[in-house]
Image (cartoon, coloured by chain):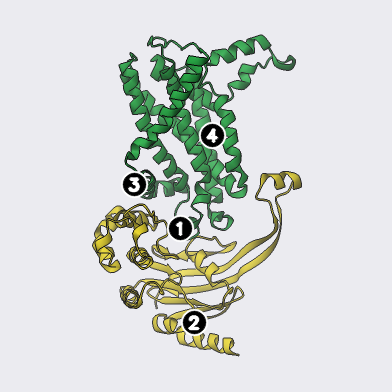
Chain colours: A green, B yellow
Amino acid sequence: MSYLREIWDSRELLQNLTNREVRGKYRRTALGQLWSLANPIAAILIYTFIFSFIFRLPAQVGDPSGIDNYALWLVCGLLPWLFFNRVLTLGTESLVANAGLIQKVYFPRIVLPLSLTNATFFTWLLEMGVLVIALSLLGSFVIPWLPLVALFMMVFALFAVGLSMIFSIINVYFRDLSYLLTIVLQFWFYLTPILYPVELVATQSNKLGGLMGTGITLLDLYSLNPVEGFVEIFRNLLYDNRVPDLTTVLVALAWTISACVVGVWMYARKEKMLAELL
Amino acid sequence: MTEWAVRVSEVSKRFRLYHERNQTLKSAILRGRTSKHEDFWALNDISFDVLAGETHGLIGSNGSGKSTLLKCLAKIYWPTSGTIEYRGRMASLLEVGSGFHLELSGRENIYLNGSILGMSKKDIDSKFDEIVDFSGVERFLDQPVKNYSSGMYVRLGFSIAINVDPDILVVDEVLSVGDEEFQRKSFQKFRELKKQGKTIILVTHAMPVVRDLCDSVTWLNNGVLQQSGPAPKVVDAYLESVES
């Protein structure tokens, strides 16, 4: 409890460190913050070209929104993923990268992954703003759903930061983790229904039936991925314009709470030793 | 009878010297256990009080453990056993300009660095002019700090740190920052802090500084407390042991 209080007391530091990340990043570039949109736009162009034009993946029709556009459908899942990817990559390195600071000044170390997540969240917010405009222009009546979208963005951010807290501590002990993570994130990306609809996995899973004589199907294993649920939630809200499935929401919340509890617990336990471990 | 501001009781600090440190997954998996190590006690059962309003020096030769003790006092390391208690707010100054962001301006860095050192925005606002004045970088305040000369950089860092305004200030050898004139100003500032009744703990190798500033001194050797007491007496004893 006292640890949570300490985090709360350092909110001003958190804000300043966030500003440092946001302002420092695109200094001395002509386009500034607009650069943060460049990556997603490039990804959208590439994936749409390959999957919609070459592979002829059928676009999903939003139910009940009725929109039918692969690029938009893709982006509703891709933007949360890109955010997740950045938080995890940067967050995992946040302690090792700030070793100099940790060894010279006392402050709650947890603000390091938190401030990175905040700064990344800010970029994600920009991206989502552009997406909302595009969705509105192309026929999704997304405005009434925005409060829920914002809420789940925060939940997803908490999940991501919880996980990156855990990883950042492990990375202090095993520096391999940050390298391993890039590979894991690649697998993770393709094992999440971002480029393709989950129905395709379901079809294959039905063909296979229960794996190795058990009742467990491929889809069951596939659905263990916590990000899958989040992607579904964001697509439901943004693309389909409907309330997500309650079970999906509850599972996502359970993942988020577990990640945060374990993350904060690890910081509370290990924080005092970080300066010598680094 | 003055009260203590910092009480160090039976503080010991153990470091692990790793012979085979498993910092990679491969070695952890291959060998199955975490690591082989040997214990090294950098501090051994240290106890002393620093009275409120006192300037206290930590002295000793290289490797005596005084920097480890200072880091424990600054809450960067945590004692393996024993406790350190504070009466009042503690701030530390181990390195100037830690956490400066090179692309950001001097102005932005004052706010950033100030908050890392534990100042609130309100504190910084009220101290802002003083910080700028003291550092003498006024003309370059809106330039990114990467364009600062090394002198300007440390002067700005020092000015922020010295204006944190804690009750207890823990200082590493930072008095040797900047040019002659800035050093004189720094000493002046330390005397002012002293006059305001702040408790200061500092590490230094410069005995003239110790004689000049410190009221009391703790002398460490190989992680063991040799003497703690009034400055002239302990400094004399220390110098004698070094010369013999």
Q: Position of residue B23 (x, y in %)?
A: 65, 50
Viewer-nearest of labels 1 and 2?
A: 1
- Label 4 sits on what residue type? Ser
Viewer-nearest of labels 4 and 2?
A: 4
Which residue does the numbered mark 3 point to in the structure image? A28
Callout 2 secondary element: strand
Looking at the image, is mark 1 or mark 3 earlier in the sequence? 3
Question: Is there one chain holding both mark 1 and mark 3?
Answer: yes
Residue B229: mark in rendering: 2
Viewer-nearest of labels 4 and 1?
A: 1
Which residue does the numbered mark 1 point to in the structure image? A106
Image position of A192 with respect to B196: above or below = above
Q: Chain of mark 4?
A: A
- Label 2 sits on what residue type? Gly
Image position of A173 with respect to A125: above or below = below
Residue B201 sits in quarter? bottom left
Callout 1 secondary element: loop
Q: Position of residue A137 (x, y in %)?
A: 30, 17
Q: Is residue A275 visible?
A: yes
Looking at the image, is mark 4 or mark 3 earlier in the sequence? 3
Image position of A141 with respect to A157: above or below = above
Question: Is there one chain holding both mark 4 and mark 2?
Answer: no
Q: Chain of mark 3?
A: A
Callout 4–callout 3 Cβ contact below 8 Å: no
Q: Nearer the viewer, residue B220 or A176?
A: A176
